[in-house]
């Protein structure tokens, strides 16, 4: 058992059990049913000028849609992201509390339900004593879990969460949120590492390599070239020809393990506003990078599989299967990987 017997962990364990029960009973209700009676249409296709909706989170989008014509659209700022923060960390970067921005900010995209993954990460590779590295988690909204997330936030203060519904289709919204928050709040951070909540990250190696090499600008990950969109309606990553007509995806960093310098993250964040979102977020980042002429650097050390045997030479390995497995593996590797 990986949890220590502190009060904090016992409380969290109870929460976890409740969550597991809840999770098996329920699926998320649609945004329309939220008590405040407002809703956000998916911004994937939203045909709204951001000036119309900016800072107005109670906007009735179908009313707005009807009231504007294409001519009114500000083409440069089409894909506004009209979501409100529910939680943000207070001490991660310089703007408040903390004395300095971290050298490396690790931004973990996590399903709101995966509290167990987050606990495991916080007690293994994410428990970093080096002050030049900080870890935050990106979450969407779940009406059932809001209270638990607030509790989690009060304990760890490492959650960025907006009020769009947390599910796979809204992945890209979560990614956009991560770029926006980090770029706006961590202006002196050198590197941003975006990673999913089922990765084991070798923070030690990242620091060793990037502290020495310090490329002025880089966007790197395990890059796939000439991959094709899936045109089979029944498959998970189906994309229609209408949505993406080209035969091939542009090169993209696969999986959800991408490191970049602040300047590129800033450019990407601006690019999101005028490039139509696609729900497959790693591909979307490839599309945006291509439009912005940001070169992708392929590096096999960002590994899309769980190759534990080679972890000492990898930046990240994917899919630890279960939180307990991560904790077990970490015990074996601790001496090599501790940052
Ligand atoms: C916006 O909506 C209009 C009419 O509904 C459509 O003709 C136009 O192509 C849309 N523009 C974008 C960028 O989606
Ligand atoms: C916000 O949206 C509501 C509903 O569409 C509208 O009545 C109100 O005038 C808007 N407020 C601002 C400040 O734009
Ligand atoms: C939003 O506006 C549409 C069109 O004006 C209206 O039919 C609908 O009832 C409104 N919805 C809400 C939640 O106010
Ligand atoms: C980006 O973040 C800023 C502050 O961190 C917030 O005010 C703004 O609404 C966000 N914008 C988008 C597009 O998410
Ligand atoms: C993180 O590590 C420190 C010791 O380095 C330990 O005291 C602390 O309990 C750990 N935190 C978690 C969440 O495991
Ligand atoms: C999120 O996903 C749900 C379900 O796929 C969808 O109904 C909703 O419109 C999406 N967007 C937001 C902003 O919640």
Image (cartoon, rainbow, N blue to C red):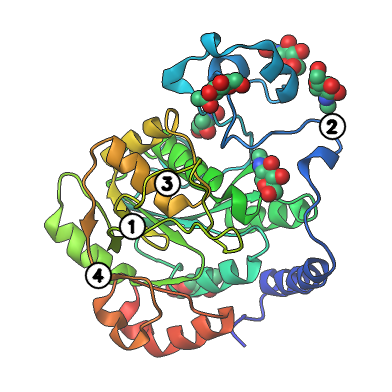
The disc, 3 or 4, on the residue closer to the chain's N-terminal end is: 3
Q: For the view shown, which residue lies furthest in the top direction?
A: 71
Between the C-alphas of marks 1 and 2, the distance is 38 Å
* Residue at numbered disc 1: 253
- Give the structural element (helix, strand or loop) at label 3: helix
* Residue 112 location, quadrant: bottom right
* Residue at numbered disc 4: 300
* Residue at numbered disc 2: 37
Front residue (pair 324, 48): 48
- Residue 284: image tag: 3
- Give the structural element (helix, strand or loop) at label 2: loop
- Give the structural element (helix, strand or loop) at label 4: loop
Residue 149: x percent and y percent?
69, 55
Front residue (pair 29, 128): 29
- Give the structural element (helix, strand or loop) at label 1: strand
Is residue 55 shown above or below 228? above
Between the C-alphas of marks 1 and 3, the distance is 10 Å
Between the C-alphas of marks 3 and 2, the distance is 31 Å
Between the C-alphas of marks 4 and 1, the distance is 11 Å
Residue sitting at x 20%, y 66%: 208
**Mark 1 Cα shell of 10 Å, populated few (<14), some (14-19), many (≥20):** many
Between the C-alphas of marks 3 and 4, the distance is 21 Å
Q: Quadrant of the C terminus?
A: bottom left
Q: Is mark 2 within 8 Å of ligand 3?
A: yes
Q: Which quadrant does ligand 3 occupy?
A: top right
Is residue 224 shown above or below 3? above
């Amino acid at each position: 058992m990986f949890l220590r017997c502190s009060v904090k962990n016992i409380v969290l364990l109870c929460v976890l059990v409740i969550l597991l029960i809840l999770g098996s009973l329920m699926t998320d209700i649609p945004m329309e049913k939220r008590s405040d009676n407002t809703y956000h249409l998916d911004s994937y296709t939203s045909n709204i000028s951001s000036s119309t909706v900016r800072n107005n989170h109670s906007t009735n989008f179908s009313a707005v849609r009807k009231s504007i014509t294409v001519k009114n659209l500000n083409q440069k700022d089409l894909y506004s992201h009209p979501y409100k923060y529910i939680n943000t960390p207070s001490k991660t970067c310089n703007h408040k509390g903390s004395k300095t921005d971290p050298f490396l900010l690790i931004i973990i995209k996590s399903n709101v339900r995966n509290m167990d993954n987050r606990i495991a990460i916080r007690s293994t590779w994410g428990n970093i004593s080096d002050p030049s590295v900080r870890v935050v988690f990106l979450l969407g909204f779940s009406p059932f879990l809001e209270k638990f997330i607030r509790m989690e936030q009060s304990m760890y203060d490492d959650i960025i969460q907006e009020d769009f519904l947390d599910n796979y289709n809204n992945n890209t919204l979560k990614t956009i949120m991560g770029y926006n928050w980090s770029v706006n709040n961590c202006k002196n951070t050198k590197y941003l590492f975006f990673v999913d909540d089922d990765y084991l990250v070798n923070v030690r190696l990242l620091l060793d390599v990037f502290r020495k090499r310090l490329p002025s600008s880089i966007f790197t990950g395990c890059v796939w070239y000439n991959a094709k969109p899936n045109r089979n309606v029944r498959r998970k990553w189906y994309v229609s020809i209408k949505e993406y007509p080209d035969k091939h995806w542009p090169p993209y960093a696969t999986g959800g393990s991408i490191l970049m310098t602040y300047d590129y993250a800033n450019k990407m964040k601006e690019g999101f506003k005028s490039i139509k979102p696609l729900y497959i977020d790693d591909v979307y980042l490839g599309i945006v990078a291509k439009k912005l002429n940001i070169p992708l650097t392929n590096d096999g050390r960002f590994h899309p599989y769980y190759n534990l045997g080679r972890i000492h030479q990898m930046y990240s390995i994917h899919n630890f299967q279960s939180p307990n497995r991560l904790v077990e593996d970490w015990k074996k590797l601790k001496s090599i990987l501790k940052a």
